[in-house]
């Protein structure tokens, strides 16, 4: 399995604090059946993790993992917080798509969707980059109205939700939103968004197994073919607005 969202590189953001955490998380991931971890340290106003630095760390830790005969590979990526100067950061090489792909993991603000977000997404698409929107189920405005994602569906975005959200560990409303997105068949990837060895450990297999057969096969297929340039994920249908009682039922399910 591929875990495409993981804060496992030690000491560079709010994820693994040190090498002990790193190796503990590696062992948890291996035990869960994960064979590839895309390292996605935050690149935001709070953390600066240029892709060149991430690649250097990934190269070094892959060598260590190989020396220790640990059957897992790291791939360089970033969790890029959307900003008005994101395209400038792309053009100057500060950010790049996930290694060996044309995917970029994009994080939105949690409380308010910036008016420029759709324009940035459009510019990425013009450059041949496919944005993967990180954990949309956690954004307040998506919890209030999932149809806000329709603009991004029309632009060809993909969507990654967190395993921990589907477990309910972020609360009932986040879980209800995650369930709604799964039900509407717009979830392309489930990832750990791991930061530690506790509740945010790199474990995803239990959640994937809990899905119904068709959705499980779709997500597994997307993850298995993540690095195949000839594999195309079908475009999504837009989300239909649910009625009040349907929303309440999903929250208290």
Image (tube, rainbow, N blue to C red):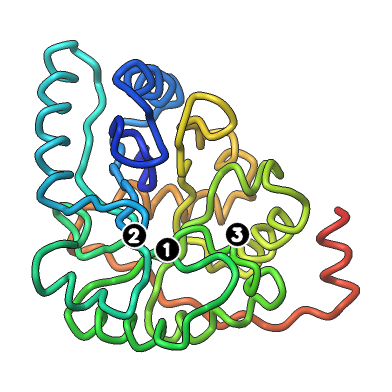
Q: Helix, strand or loop at disc 3?
A: helix
Distance between the alpha carbons at the discs numbered 2 and 3: 18 Å
Q: Position of residue 133 (x, y in %)?
A: 43, 66
Disc 2 packing (10 Å; few <14; some 14–19; many ≥20): some
Which residue is pictured at 26% across the width and 74% down the height?
A: 86
Q: From the viewer's perspective, tell me whether residue 129 is left or right of residue 139.
A: left
View extreme (top): residue = 68
Of the residues under marks 3 and 1, which one precedes in the sequence? 1
Give coordinates of residue 144: x percent, y percent. 72, 74
SS at circle 2: loop
Q: Are marks 3 and 1 in contact (CB under 8 Å)?
A: no
Dot 1: element: strand
**Which residue is located at x 68 percent, y 58 percent?**
179
Where is mark 2, residue-wise? 44
Q: Nearer the viewer, mark 2 or mark 1?
A: 2
What residue is pinned by disc 3?
138
Closer mark to the observer between disc 2 and disc 3: 2
Q: Is residue 190 left or right of residue 91?
A: right
Circle 2/circle 1 CB separation < 8 Å: yes
Residue receiving disc 1: 107
User: Which of the two labelled residues, at mark 2 and mark 1, occupies the earlier sequence position?
Assistant: 2
Neighbor class of circle 3 (other Cα within 10 Å; few <14, some 14-19, many 20+) is many
């Amino acid at each position: 399995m591929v875990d495409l969202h993981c804060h496992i590189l030690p000491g560079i953001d709010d994820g693994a604090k040190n090498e002990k955490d790193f190796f503990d998380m590696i062992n948890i991931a291996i035990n869960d059946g994960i064979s590839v971890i895309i390292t996605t340290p935050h690149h935001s106003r709070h953390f600066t993790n240029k892709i060149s630095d991430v690649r250097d760390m990934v190269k070094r830790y892959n060598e260590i993992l190989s020396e220790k005969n640990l059957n897992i590979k790291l791939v360089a990526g970033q969790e890029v917080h959307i900003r008005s100067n994101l395209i400038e950061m792309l053009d100057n090489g500060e950010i790049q798509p996930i290694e060996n792909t044309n995917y970029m993991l994009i994080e939105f603000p949690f409380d308010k969707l910036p008016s420029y977000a759709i324009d940035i997404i459009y510019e990425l698409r013009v450059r041949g980059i496919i944005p993967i929107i990180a954990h949309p189920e956690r954004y307040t405005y998506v919890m209030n109205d999932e149809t806000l994602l329709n603009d991004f569906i029309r632009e060809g975005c993909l969507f990654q939700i967190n395993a921990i959200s589907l477990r309910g560990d972020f609360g009932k409303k986040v879980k209800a939103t995650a369930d709604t997105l799964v039900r509407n068949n717009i979830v392309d990837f489930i990832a750990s968004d791991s930061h530690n060895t506790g509740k945010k450990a790199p474990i995803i297999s239990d959640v994937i197994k809990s899905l119904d057969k068709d959705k499980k096969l779709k997500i597994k297929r997307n993850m298995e073919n993540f690095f195949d340039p000839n594999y195309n994920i079908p475009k999504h249908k837009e989300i239909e607005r649910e009625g009040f009682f349907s929303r309440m039922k999903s929250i208290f399910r």
